[in-house]
Image: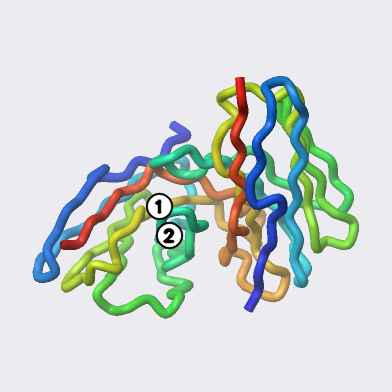
Amino acid sequence: GQQLNQSPQSMFIQEGEDVSMNCTSSSIFNTWLWYKQDPGEGPVLLIALYKAGELTSNGRLTAQFGITRKDSFLNISASIPSDVGIYFCAGPPYETSYDKVIFGPGTSLSVIP
Amino acid sequence: DTEVTQTPKHLVMGMTNKKSLKCEQHMGHRAMYWYKQKAKKPPELMFVYSYEKLSINESVPSRFSPECPNSSLLNLHLHALQPEDSALYLCASSQRGGQGGTNEQFFGPGTRLTVL
């Protein structure tokens, strides 16, 4: 079945550093969604991407929809302690129902003050 | 109102109990979802309701029974669960994707279910 891969699996960074993480798939996606989840809470939508090549920002976060439509990237600039959490990429594979969103395994981010 | 609410926040039940999880949204979204999330794993899709009709069932065991009484409410009825069903159950909603809406899903805080 369809599968998303995220790298790195986890990262430990100093406060103030920039962060880059990515998401790849063997399938084409029409939409890429990036979520952040804090422990015991539901995922919160950070950025949604709808077009190949699209670059979208939300404050210190920037995400890009890869031109092959099989990958996406999320960057966080000048990290702060509240950026700690698990970051998931998600989306509906092209060949499935538009409502059938699958999630990557996540990237766990730790920020050292 | 841009919030998805879920009740209860925590639930402990025995394997012979019947309980229900509730989810509500007032964003006018026409698609609602149930996900199951085990510790340190991503959410896994269980059910999708589109315009109050069940559109996707990801081969979920019949001891989980979803219900969508109206466009704002989504229930998950639980009966004869197993300890391995213990997890965080997440509800989400979105505009109807693929028909002029988007499938940006907004999640509730979840119900932490423990089956003894």
> Residue tagged by mark 2?
B35
The answer to whether residue B77 is above or below residue A18 is below
The answer to whether residue B65 is above or below residue A90 is below
- In primary-sequence order, the first of circles 2 and 1 is 2
Q: Using the rendered image of the protein, determine whether residue A47 is visible from the camera's viewpoint.
A: yes
Q: Quadrant of residue B58?
A: bottom left
Q: Are marks 2 and 1 in contact (CB under 8 Å)?
A: yes
Q: Position of residue A86 (x, y in %)?
A: 56, 43
**Between residues A15 and A39, which one lies in front from this camera angle?**
A15
Color style of the picture: rainbow
Chain letter belonging to callout 1: B
Q: Quadrant of residue A55?
A: top right
Chain letter belonging to callout 2: B
Q: Residues within 10 Å of mark 2 (few under 14, many from 20)?
A: some
Q: Position of residue A23 (x, y in %)?
A: 73, 55
**Between residues A96 and A85, which one lies in front from this camera angle?**
A85
Residue at figure coordinates x 52%, y 57% from the top left: B42
**Between residues A98 and A60, which one lies in front from this camera angle?**
A60
Q: Tell me the quarter of the image containing the N terminus of chain B.
A: top left
> Residue tagged by mark 1?
B91
Instruction: Assign a secondary structure to mark 1.
Output: strand
Q: Using the rendered image of the protein, determine whether residue B69 is visible from the camera's viewpoint.
A: no
The three-letter amino acid code for the residue at tag 1 is Cys
Instruction: Assign a secondary structure to mark 2.
Output: strand
